Image (spheres, rainbow, N blue to C red):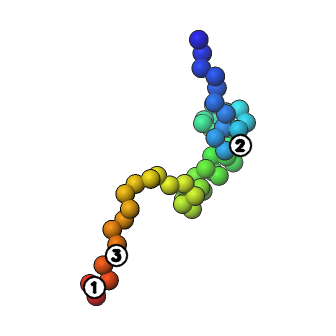
Amino acid sequence: MTRPERPCPVCRKPRSAEFSPFCSSRCRDRDLMQWLEEGYSIPGRAAPPANSDED
């Protein structure tokens, strides 16, 4: 039994072997820009408050 092919995570079109898991370089680049512009995030602990007493 084969697993169904997952679509491109950006536009939902069929994946391309050349750009997997995306369908094209355009979708691959769009995904990269989301990471670089902080459009995606990975949950974690809250950052400690900044200590402004150290001048």
Q: What element carries label 3?
A: loop
| Nearest to viewer (mark 3 / mark 2) | 3
Which residue does the image show at 60% across and 36% down from the upper left? 21
Q: Which mark is residue 11?
A: 2
Around disc 2, counting alpha carbons within 10 Å, would you say few (fewer than 14), some (14 to 19), or many (20 or more)? few
Q: How far apart are marks 2 and 1 (CA)?
A: 48 Å
Q: Which amino acid does label 3 sit on?
A: Ala
- Residue 26, compared with residue 45, is above or below; it is above
The first of marks 3 and 2 along the sequence is 2
Residue 35: percent from left, percent from top = 54, 55
- Residue 10, compared with residue 38, is above or below; it is above
Residue under label 3: 50
Residue 51: percent from left, percent from top = 30, 78
The first of marks 2 and 1 along the sequence is 2
Q: What residue type is labelled 1?
A: Asp
Q: Distance between the residues labelled 1 and 3?
A: 9 Å
User: How many labels were placed on the picture?
Assistant: 3
| Residue 40 found in image quarter | bottom right
The answer to whether residue 52 is left or right of residue 34 is left
**Nearer to the camera, 30 or 2:** 2
Q: What element carries label 2?
A: loop
The N terminus: image quadrant? top right
The answer to whether residue 23 is left or right of residue 41 is right
Q: Which amino acid does label 2 sit on?
A: Cys
Q: Residue 53 carries which label?
A: 1
Residue furthest out toward the bottom:
55
Residue 16: percent from left, percent from top = 67, 33
